[in-house]
Amino acid sequence: MVSVKEVPQIGDRIYTDFRECCEEQKVPYRWVCNKMLQEGVSVQDAVRYYKRKQEKKLQKAQKQVPVKGKMLEPQPVNVLGKKYESKERCYKGLGITKKSVQNHMKKTSCMFEEAVVYCYEKKLEKQFEFRREIYKSYNACCTAYNLAQEYVAIKAKREKITRQEAMEKLLAQRESEKTI
């Protein structure tokens, strides 16, 4: 077991007092004591350990501090064979959201390009075409024509027709009722 009575030597300096060593090296005395007791290391090793830890923390903090007033230049990205000036332009060009891409990346641990392709394909699957117009979704189309989604779906299923055909029939029925 290592004792506190050891004479610590850090670099060229030999300390006569353990507390003085910790204060001068700007390392908490309690931390050093705990390290020595828990791992059975010498005073020098414990002090060096915490000095290195503090230096690493300082270096990490210096790396992360962005330069004030300086904006990072957007990086170009290639997605689906097309080059975009930045990720934001890519989101806008494909009509997807940054949040959906980031959520997919986080959930599946995939690369940016893969997440963008997935979100774009998912968006295309949801799109609904009716009367030569493309709607964001089936629900959005029904809302635009003031039709109940459930009613359209039931009619399509009963008559074994597409939802578009069911909507056409319901709208025609509504028009014929207005003329009567």
Image (spheres, helix red, strand yellow):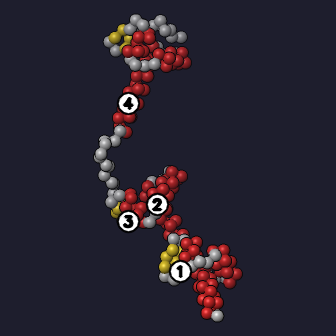
Find residue 159 and report its horizontal and vertical position in percent: 68, 84
| Circle 3: element type | loop
| Circle 4: element type | helix
x 30%, y 45%: residue: 69
Q: Can residue 35 be seen in this snapshot?
A: yes
Which residue type does callout 2 highlight? Thr
How would you rate the neighbour count of disc 4 (Cα within 10 Å): few for under 14, some for 14-19, many for 20 or more? Answer: few
Q: Is residue 35 above or below residue 69?
A: above
| Circle 1: element type | strand
Find residue 68 and report its horizontal and vertical position in percent: 31, 42
Give me the C-alpha separation between circle 3 and circle 1: 29 Å
Q: Residue furthest bottom?
A: 180
Mark 2 — residue? 97
Of labels 4 and 2, earlier in sequence is 4
Of badges 2 and 3, the one in the foreground is 2
Give me the C-alpha separation between circle 3 and circle 4: 42 Å
Which residue type does callout 4 highlight? Leu
Which residue type does callout 3 highlight? Gly
Which residue type does callout 1 highlight? Phe
Query: Quarter-wise, where is residue 176 in the image?
Result: bottom right
Discs 4, 2 touching: Cβ within 8 Å: no
